[in-house]
Image: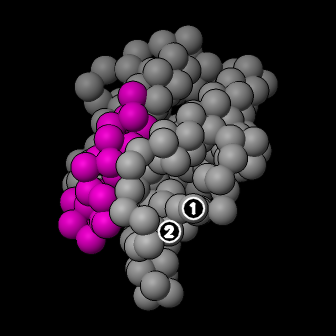
Amino acid sequence: MKRRIWATAIGYQAVWLCAVAGAGRGLAWPGVTAGALFVAAMLAVASRPAQEAMLAAAAIGAGALLDGGLAASGWLRYAAAWPAPAFAPAWILALWAAFATTLPVLLPAWLRAPLPAALLGAIGGPLAYLGAARGFGAVEFVAPGPALVTLALGWAVALAALAMLARSTPRPAATETIR
């Protein structure tokens, strides 16, 4: 199990790096490709691939709403804004999907209740965007105050909802990480 935890953590960090470094250079495809390969690999070894695919799809929906809303509002400006500047870029949706597949492996304790998940989302979500902005130029905070508040609230709600979804899906009794 420790090997899977390390492989998942390192793999997701590689996806994040491909996505934000690529976007910072105006390229969406590195993040989309890395994200798709990572999600496929995670689903291939998942004990409940259909449920984890549903979790990834829900995360894409959450990302489309949150990041699309921020892009449309003009509070955030994404580099490599494909398919359009007013929508969530494909590379960030790939990150949402990849992140969702890490939840059962890396954060099972945080998924036991929505409140810890919301707290993690409220803090970790905005920090990831700040890192992408300052380190790689993948996103620009046009209106930093409203954008950071929206990111904190949006990630809190999204991660709490994903935690509840992860816990509500049927799973085999003795082999699961989330309990």
Crowdedness of circle 2 by 10 Å Cα count: few (<14), some, many (20+)? some
- Residue at the spot of label 1: 179
- Residue 1, x across and y down, in percent: 46, 85
Q: Residue at x 56, y 45 (%)?
A: 163
Q: Is residue 12 visible?
A: no
68 shown above or below 157: above
- Quarter occupied by the C terminus: bottom right
- Amino acid type at mark 1: Arg
Give SS at disc 1: loop
- Amino acid type at mark 2: Thr
- Residue at the spot of label 2: 177
Q: Main secondary structure of the magenta part?
A: helix
Residue furthest front as drawn: 173
Magenta stretch? 38-61
- Residue 107, x across and y down, in percent: 59, 62
Q: Is residue 88 left or right of residue 84?
A: right
**Contact, mark 2 vs mark 1 (Cβ under 8 Å):** yes
User: Looking at this view, is 20 or 109 the one in front?
Assistant: 109
Q: Is residue 120 visible?
A: yes
User: Looking at this view, is 148 or 4 the one in front?
Assistant: 4
